[in-house]
Image: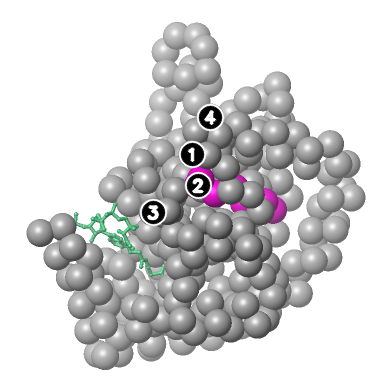
Amino acid sequence: ATIRRTEPTAGSGDSARRFGTQRVLVEPDAASGVAVMKFKNPPVNSLSLELLTEFIISLEKLENDKTFRGVILTSDCPRVFSAGLDLTEMCGKNPAHYAEYWKAVQELWLRLYLSNLVLIAAINGACPAGGCLISLTCDYRILADNPKYLIGLNETLLGIVAPFWFKDTLVNTIGHRASEQALQLGLLFLPAEALQVGLVDQVVPEDQVLSTALSVMARWMAIPDHARQLTKNMMRKTTVDRLVKQRDADIQNFVSFISRDSIQKSLQMYLEKLKQKKG
Ligand SMILES: CCCCCCCC/C=C\CC(=O)SCCNC(=O)CCNC(=O)[C@H](O)C(C)(C)COP(=O)(O)OP(=O)(O)OC[C@H]1O[C@@H](n2cnc3c(N)ncnc32)[C@H](O)[C@@H]1OP(=O)(O)O
């Protein structure tokens, strides 16, 4: 994928210190050691191969810069945090493309789930499927209180199956029984329900999502990094190792599953339904 980096804006002030790429804006605050990373892939921040690649690059840059200890993930697109994996990347393409795409999805998850940074999701919009997965990799989730901002792993509604590492990430967050129901039914939770089941940690008025994320971040950053990082590693490494051990097999499973005629038909019908919703 071609990556176009955004140039720093001329002049002084915050905008002058922004960096990032075309689809991932990074607003760094060196004084606090916190960066706000905003997805900007209109209209719905679907996780295209380009967005995944740019996300990985921006994250790596922040991980390697010792100035930064915390990152807030949020959306630059109104009303949507992320619509999840880009369905057009999984429809009508060839097996090599599916393999490349899935490898990028795995890579992002691996890097996020064991990131040394404190990651906080400031969920300012709808958050289905892959969008929910990204938020689940964070250390803390804050969701805007809006009945349109549904969150969950709704894969079964599309006729597809969340892979084991999506499932593991959910189970680690809300437990086995709640995950069993949520995954089989493809549940998309309202904010209050998401809070009740433990899918998010806080629900706040829409205009307070970012400020809440910044105050929560201060609390997490008060903990010595080495102790927090080792603890995070202890909690998450087994889950990550499961995928690392069978990464290639997982890609092969994805490619053969997604290439099935029946799955292609289901995805195409789902995309059609999304488009018809407007008309
Ligand atoms: C053995 C291993 C097997 C592994 C199997 C595969 C596992 C796959 C795992 C992951 C699953 C996913 O992440 S799949 C994606 C699931 N996502 C969704 O179901 C969300 C779909 N989108 C919506 O519900 C809505 O778009 C929204 C609530 C997010 C926003 O609604 P809004 O009304 O604001 O916008 P529109 O619906 O009008 O959409 C605008 C525009 O965007 C297109 N669109 C939406 N979502 C996607 C998407 N995920 N990918 C690609 N394109 C998407 C939509 O069609 C509209 O397009 P047009 O403007 O051209 O009409």
What is the three-letter code of the residue carrying label 1? Glu
State the CA–CA distance, disc 3 to disc 2.
9 Å
The image shows a total of numbered marks equal to 4
Q: Secondary structure at mark 2?
A: loop
Left/right of residue 67 with respect to residue 199 in the rendered view: right
What is the three-letter code of the residue carrying label 2? Asp
Q: Where is residue 251 drawn, in percent x and y?
A: 48, 80
* Quadrant for the C terminus in the image: bottom left
State the CA–CA distance, disc 4 to disc 3.
27 Å
State the CA–CA distance, disc 2 to disc 4.
24 Å
In the picture of the structure, the residue carrying the numbered disc 3 is 148
Which range of residues does the magenta coloring cover? Answer: 139-145
Specify whether residue 111 is painted magenta: no
In the picture of the structure, the residue carrying the numbered disc 1 is 206
Disc 3 within 8 angstroms of ligand 1 (CB): yes
Q: What secondary structure prevails in the magenta region? A: strand
Q: Where is residue 72 drawn, in percent x and y?
A: 60, 41
Q: Nearer the viewer, residue 94 or 146?
A: 146
Residue at the spot 86% in from the left edge and 41% down from the top edge: 223
The reply to whether residue 76 is visible in this rendering is yes
State the CA–CA distance, disc 4 to disc 1.
20 Å
Residue 145 - label? 2
In the picture of the structure, the residue carrying the numbered disc 4 is 27
Disc 1 within 8 angstroms of ligand 1 (CB): no
Disc 2 within 8 angstroms of ligand 1 (CB): no
What is the three-letter code of the residue carrying label 3? Lys
| Marks 2 and 1, the one that precedes in the sequence | 2
Residue 64: quadrant of the picture: top right
Marks 4/3 in contact by CB < 8 Å: the verdict is no
